[in-house]
Image (tube, rainbow, N blue to C red):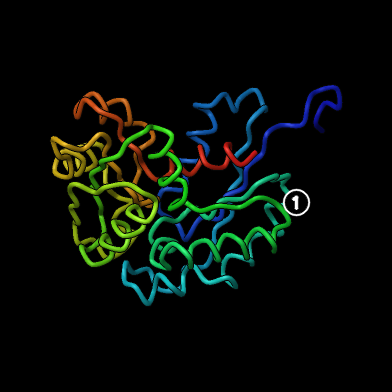
């Protein structure tokens, strides 16, 4: 039982599609001092349907019904804000569609809501980065939707690299060397920050290595998703 003399912890809930890099969230909770119990990051898995970085599959993955299914459990676990922890199945709706997605999620959950796509947009703005590079695991056609989303947010994408990976399951197997190689390949001399947009990608343990390697800020999906949730609080 929680000590009633202690303040209520800051609890952000995450709806995470399938099973790939969900272990990033307890890792990030620990990095943020979660052992003290002041920050909690509970996660609920959503049904992804078909695991495919393909537009039709992503639109279904991010549908209102699939997101709504996990909201009650997050509320029971004390969440005061909720984030759809998926980039591709939010930006693929376009800016206005992604806004509608989080608006419906907020209404269903009865709490502030956002998504990883907006997390990236807000993080880029917070850094004051006008020019960014995208190092994506996705096929180029899917990554291009992210380019358009960032343009709508006011950022110039000076370079974009897609890796052609179809499934989140495959992305989840990548280790440190693959992630460093992806970031190096996606960097550009004019970019003020490099973005790695896939929440299926493990990055939390290697962000200092990435930034040391590139000499500039590196924003990764699960990192900015947690930041966005805390920002909502």
At 35% from the left and 38% from the top, the residue drawn is 219
The quarter of the picture where residue 163 lies is bottom left
Q: Mark 1 highlights which residue? A: 76
At 65% from the left and 46% from the top, the residue drawn is 81
**Residue lying farthest front?**
154
Choose between 125 and 227: the one closer to the eye: 125
Position of 214 compared to 128: left or right? left
Q: Which structural element holds mark 1?
A: helix
Percent position of residue 31, x then y: 49, 26
Percent position of residue 189, x then y: 13, 35
Choose between 139 and 1: the one closer to the eye: 139
Please give the count of numbered marks on the rendered protein: 1
At 73% from the left and 56% from the top, the residue drawn is 110
Q: Quadrant of the C terminus?
A: top right
Q: Quadrant of the N terminus?
A: top right
The quarter of the picture where residue 130 lies is top left
């Amino acid at each position: 039982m929680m000590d009633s003399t202690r303040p209520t912890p800051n609890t952000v809930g995450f709806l995470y599609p399938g099973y790939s890099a969900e272990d990033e969230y307890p890792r990030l909770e620990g990095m943020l001092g979660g052992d003290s119990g002041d920050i909690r990051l509970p996660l609920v898995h959503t049904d992804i349907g078909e695991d495919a970085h393909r537009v039709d599959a992503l639109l279904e993955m991010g549908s209102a019904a699939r997101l709504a299914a996990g909201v009650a459990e997050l509320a029971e676990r004390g969440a005061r804000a909720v984030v759809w922890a998926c980039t591709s199945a939010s930006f693929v709706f376009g800016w206005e569609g992604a806004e509608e997605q989080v608006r419906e999620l907020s209404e269903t959950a009865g709490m502030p809501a956002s998504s990883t796509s907006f997390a990236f947009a807000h993080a880029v703005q917070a850094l004051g980065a006008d020019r960014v590079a995208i190092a994506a695991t996705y096929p180029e056609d899917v990554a291009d939707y992210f380019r358009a989303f960032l343009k709508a947010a006011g950022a110039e994408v000076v370079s974009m690299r897609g890796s052609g990976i179809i499934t989140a399951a495959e992305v989840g197997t990548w280790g440190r060397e693959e992630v460093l190689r992806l970031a190096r390949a996606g960097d550009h001399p004019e970019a003020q920050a490099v973005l790695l947009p896939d929440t299926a990608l493990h990055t939390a343990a290697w962000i200092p290595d990435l930034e040391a390697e590139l000499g500039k800020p590196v924003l990764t999906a699960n990192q900015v998703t947690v930041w966005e949730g805390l920002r909502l609080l």
